[in-house]
């Protein structure tokens, strides 16, 4: 409930980003969005009761998406002709911060009790948001001097700049990609650790290593993957990585009881996931106004994560009841692998056909 209500707030931010499309307000959005986020985070440390805390949590989802979209729009504008690499490099601290925050939050909750943990978590998060606003205020002159990036060439050889009218990709394939990626990601971080514990009896240390390894590789690999997107094209990187990701998910269903093969599969998942993230965010900004597209990217990803986690639990409960077996987990992994492969095929073909039609129109 706590995460789901935040997702509703994330979608509520999209109309505001749509209203601001085409305007260079990214620096102001980072500053004021971070200040508002800090106030809302601090409010959640207060004894408001569940209902009002959820209301504040929903509002915090609005500011969270606004700041994310505005920050990455600044990255896009600063990257010039190397948008894939710029987005990839910026994604590394984003993903590492997500992992560090999850670990730190778990540590605080374990070491403290009741309201003390809320004061630590929400209070420190509020301070960090104020820090972001302060940094953005200090460097605002530099970003305000940067003109919005020129339109992006649709050629597969790279994301070259051109001065003539931009031909945009449709947005739905990029959002479907992101939904699929995060849905399977929810399976890894939420459902797989349960299988490793209940079915195979892995220790907490081994489980942490097996699940943390792909997340770390994903964070570290987004920069190189973004550079590759600039060189050979984001769509090509996306398709290759999508096939590898889906295949490795299918392998999880047969490698769960062997630690070394399972670790190898996790490495493949982490490397391919880094390419998926970089290519998806590079593709989505070619489909519309940057802040709107990036906000939709974030919203679709959050919806995918929540849906994937909930649907996997539903499938396991339907198949195995309270004590799912290895075959039940294997079936769920195979279903998600097939879903991701099918999404990769449909979205890849849709983007390719759209670009072919646009190129034909351009020739006239």
Image (spheres, helix red, strand yellow):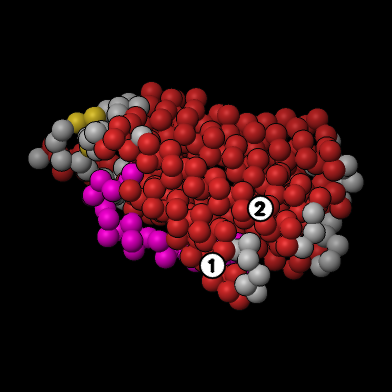
**Mark earlier in primary sequence (2, 1):** 1
Q: Horizontal placement of 86 versus 48: left or right? A: left
Image quadrant in which the N terminus is located: bottom right
Q: Is residue 80 in sight in this rendering? A: yes
Residue linked to disc 2 = 121
Q: Residue at x 9, y 40 (%)?
A: 364
Q: Which residues are magenta?
A: 1-27
Magenta-span inclusion, residue 6: yes
Residue 299 appears anywhere in the view: no
Instruction: Report the residue at 70% width, 66% height from top.
Output: 314
Name the residue rendered at 88%, 42% in the picture.
203
Q: Could you say where residue 173 lies in the image, as x and y percent from the top left?
A: 40, 50
**Up/down of 261 relative to 13, above or below:** above
Apparent side of residue 315 relative to residue 76 in the rendered image (left or right): right
Instruction: Tell me what residue is drawn at x 76 percent, y 66 percent.
Output: 317
Q: Residues within 10 Å of mark 1 (few under 14, many from 20)?
A: many
* Residue 23 falls left or right of residue 170: left
Q: Assign a secondary structure to mark 2.
A: helix
**Residue contact at pointers 2 and 1, CB within 8 angstroms:** no
The residue lying toward the viewer, choosing from 286 and 12, is 12
Chief secondary structure of the magenta portion: helix
Q: CA distance from mark 2 to mark 1?
A: 15 Å
Q: Residues within 10 Å of mark 2 (few under 14, many from 20)?
A: many
Write down the quadrant of residue 282 in the picture.
top left
What residue would you read off at disc 1?
56
């Amino acid at each position: 409930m706590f995460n789901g209500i935040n997702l509703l707030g994330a979608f509520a931010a999209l109309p505001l980003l749509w209203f601001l499309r085409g305007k260079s307000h990214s620096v102001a959005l980072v500053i004021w969005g971070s200040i508002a986020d800090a106030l809302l985070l601090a409010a959640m440390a207060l004894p408001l009761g569940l209902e009002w805390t959820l209301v504040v949590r929903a509002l915090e989802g609005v500011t969270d998406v606004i700041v994310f979209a505005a920050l990455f729009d600044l990255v896009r504008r600063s990257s010039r002709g190397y948008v894939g690499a710029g987005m990839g490099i910026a994604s590394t601290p984003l993903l590492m911060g997500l992992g560090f925050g999850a670990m730190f939050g778990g540590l605080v909750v374990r070491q403290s009790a009741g309201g003390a943990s809320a004061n630590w978590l929400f209070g420190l998060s509020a301070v960090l948001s104020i820090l972001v606003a302060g940094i953005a205020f200090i460097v605002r002159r530099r970003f305000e001097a940067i003109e919005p990036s020129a339109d992006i060439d649709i050629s597969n050889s790279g994301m070259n700049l051109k001065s003539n009218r931009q031909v945009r990709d449709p947005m739905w394939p990029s959002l479907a990609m992101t939904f699929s990626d995060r849905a399977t990601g929810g399976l890894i971080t939420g459902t797989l650790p349960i299988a490793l514990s209940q079915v195979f009896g892995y220790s907490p240390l081994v489980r942490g290593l097996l699940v943390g390894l792909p997340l770390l590789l994903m964070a570290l690999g987004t920069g190189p993957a973004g550079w590759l997107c600039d060189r050979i094209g984001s769509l090509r990187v996306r398709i290759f990585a999508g096939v590898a990701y889906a295949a490795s998910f299918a392998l999880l269903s047969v490698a769960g009881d062997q630690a070394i093969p399972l670790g190898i599969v996790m490495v493949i998942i982490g490397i391919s996931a880094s390419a998926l993230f970089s290519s998806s965010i590079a593709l989505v900004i070619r489909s519309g106004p940057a802040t709107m597209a990036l906000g939709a990217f974030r919203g679709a990803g959050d919806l995918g994560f929540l849906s994937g986690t909930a649907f996997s639990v539903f499938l396991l409960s339907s198949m195995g009841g309270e004590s799912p077996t290895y075959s039940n987990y294997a079936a769920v992994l195979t279903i998600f692998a097939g879903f991701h492969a099918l999404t990769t095929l449909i979205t890849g073909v849709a983007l390719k056909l759209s670009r072919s039609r646009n190129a034909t129109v351009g020739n006239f």
